[in-house]
Amino acid sequence: RRAVKGFPRSERGSLKAQMVNAAESIAFNIVEGCGSTSSKEFARFLDISIKSTSELEYQLQLVTDSHLLARGVTHPLGAEAVEIRRMLCGLRRKVLTAPPSAAITDNHWSTNTSKLPTQD
């Protein structure tokens, strides 16, 4: 959001919104995928996140080529998108090759309160 804040008024609607949506979609799909009931379904959400990193990377190149943002701003953001994509690809690979017993369950993210210290 900070990077596109200074876009000219003519570009503030479409491209700015698309870039923010693509960036947010990366995290949103990971979070949504964490609620999946199977590894295959989780991998599908990770795949959508991976695609969003590619979309954002292109959009950063587009705004650089259009002189809407300086390369000094877009280059580090693009590098970050590439690194996130690499991590997501690795995670997706691990999710798909995990044994069935490691599948995501309803309690996967919950805290086991029986192991928490009690207050006396």
Image (cartoon, rainbow, N blue to C red):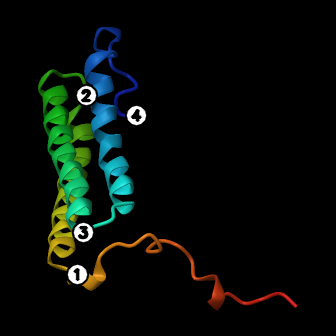
112 or 48: which is nearer to us?
112
SS category of the residue bearing label 4: loop
Q: Does 83 appear above or below 52?
A: below
Q: CA distance from mark 4 to mark 1?
A: 39 Å
Q: Which residue is mark 4?
A: 1
Q: CA distance from mark 1 to mark 3?
A: 8 Å
SS category of the residue bearing label 1: helix
Q: Which residue is mark 2?
A: 69
Q: Which residue is mark 1?
A: 100
Q: Type of residue at label 4?
A: Arg
Q: Nearer the viewer, mark 3 or mark 4?
A: 3
Dot 1 or dot 3: first in sequence order is 3
Dot 1 or dot 2: first in sequence order is 2
Contact? badges 4 and 2 (CB < 8 Å): no
Q: CA distance from mark 3 to mark 2?
A: 39 Å
* Left or right: where 108 falls relative to 75: right
Residue at x 16%, y 46% (from the top left corner)? 51
Q: Nearer the viewer, mark 4 or mark 1?
A: 1
